[in-house]
Image (spheres, rainbow, N blue to C red):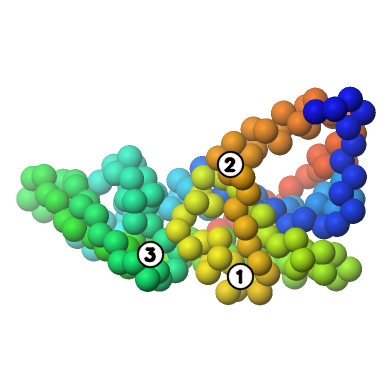
Amino acid sequence: MEPGFRFKSQVAFFIVDIGGGRTEVAVISLGGLVLSKSLKIAGNKLNQDIIQWADQEYKLLIGERTAETIKIGIGSAHPMKEKLEMPMRGRNLVTGLPEEILVSDGEIRKALERSIGQIIMAIKTAIEETPPELLADIMASGIHMSGGGSLLRSLDYSGYKKETKIPTKIIEDPMTTVVRGAGMVLEHLDELREVLAETEYLEPPR
């Protein structure tokens, strides 16, 4: 980073970071934070959705790592042309014995449907609260996605553009975005102080 660096964005940016424990939504303009929201639904919750679905649908007990593997392997937000299947291994809660079941991307998509819908709803709420004068910039620059959760298949295009009518893109190296951004802020705390603000935390619907 060059000495004397200043954050001088002349347009508004809409950012969605889907991490492990939270989804963070923010609008940034002119180097300042316009609004931000945080939802307790992200990668870990999606794993729990798969675990709960396996229990309810097949009476199969699976672990967090298995759920994560299935989510990465065949998880998606919306239907895709390619149909995927994957073995799901766990313990049958009725017999107590190990069991393997072949599951499809459609089944996993159904398991994730409610949580994905809540993330999209939080994004739509933020868009509705964004000042009208900034929407033109956001529609031009698009929704920028980061975090491991943003890599879920079809989430970047089908999941958001269909619901928000705004183009969506995954930024370069989304897994390390937060770490790199935090480092930038620490290196230039005085210049970026305006970006540091309180976040509105949203509770998921019960």
Residue 131, percent from left and from top: 85, 66
**Residue hosting label 3:** 109
Q: CA distance from mark 2 to mark 3?
A: 25 Å
Residue 166, percent from left and from top: 68, 69
In this rendering, the label closer to the viewer, 2 or 3: 2
Disc 3 + disc 1, Cβ < 8 Å: no
In the image, what residue type sits under mark 2?
A: Asp
- Of callouts 2 and 1, the N-terminal one: 1
Quarter holding the N terminus is top right
- Of callouts 3 and 1, the N-terminal one: 3
- Of callouts 2 and 3, the N-terminal one: 3
**Residue hosting label 1:** 161
Residue 14, percent from left and from top: 73, 57
Q: Quadrant of residue 5?
A: top right
> Where 42 falls versus 80 (above or below)?
above
Q: CA distance from mark 2 to mark 1?
A: 21 Å
